[in-house]
Structures are given as structure tokens and as C-alpha cells.
Amino acid sequence: MPGPPWHIPALMAKLTEEGEELRLAAPEERLGELADLQEVLGALAEALGFSDDQVQEAARRKRAERGGFSRRLWLDSVTTPE
């Protein structure tokens, strides 16, 4: 089976680049950087065969199952009994 179309790895690399630009952005530049990230995410979702509605529904399901970031809690690790 052939590998993914060339644009999928390119979009993944662009996503990383845009994320780093957001991380380094001055406060007044953050909105534009978020817009860039959203643009790349939309293109990547489309390239992978997902609609915006499918992505939003998956996000809603995950938020319902695991919670979101609105409470600003961060899970560092999970331990399970052996």
C-alpha cells in the first residue's frame, strides 16, 4: 500500500511550525497565529477525509468522556495497578 499523499506530512509539519509560532508570539500576534493553526487544522482534517462537523463531534465526545481544558487542570501521568 502506498504512503500518504505528500500533502499530509507537509500539513503535519506546518501544524508543528504554526504551533511553535503561536508559542513564541507576542500577545498582540496570538489571534493571527491561532487563525493560522485553525486554517492548517481544517486543511489537514479535509486531507484525512474528515469534515469540520466530524471533528467537532469527536471533540464533544472526548470532552464529555475526559473533560476539557476549561478548568485548567493538567494530567501529568497515570498509574495503574500491575
Image: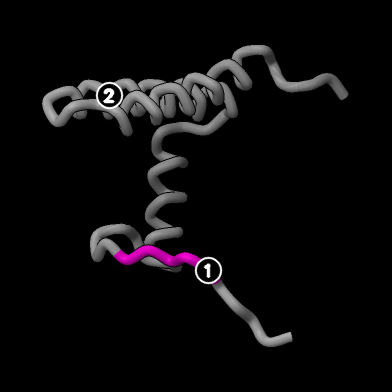
- In the rendering, at what x and y percent does residue 50 appear? 52, 33
- In the rendering, at what x and y percent does residue 27 appear? 14, 31
Outermost residue to the right: 1
Q: Relative to residue 11, is residue 3 drawn left or right?
A: right
Quadrant of res 75: bottom left
Name the residue rendered at 46%, 41% in the picture: 54
Q: Relative to residue 9, is residue 28 drawn left or right?
A: left
**Residue named by callout 1:** 77
- Compared to 39, does 58 lie above or below? below
- In the rendering, at what x and y percent does residue 4 appear? 72, 21
Q: Relative to residue 41, is residue 10 drawn left or right?
A: right
- In this view of the protein, which residue sits in the foreground, 68 or 58? 68
Quadrant of res 62: bottom left
Name the residue rendered at 46%, 50% in the picture: 58
Q: Residues within 10 Å of mark 1 (few under 14, many from 20)?
A: few
| Amino acid type of the residue tagged 1 in the rendering | Ser
Name the residue rendered at 34%, 60% in the picture: 68
Q: Identify the colour scheme used.
A: one colour
- In this view of the protein, which residue sits in the foreground, 33 or 45? 33
- In this view of the protein, which residue sits in the foreground, 46 or 81? 81
| Amino acid type of the residue tagged 2 in the rendering | Glu
Q: Is residue 75 magenta?
A: yes
Q: Circle 2 sits in a helix, a strand or a loop, which is it?
A: helix
Name the residue rendered at 31%, 58% in the picture: 69
* Range shown magenta: 73-77
Q: Residues within 10 Å of mark 2 (few under 14, many from 20)?
A: many
**Residue named by callout 2:** 33
Q: Relative to residue 57, is residue 26 drawn left or right?
A: left
- In this view of the protein, which residue sits in the foreground, 38 or 53? 38
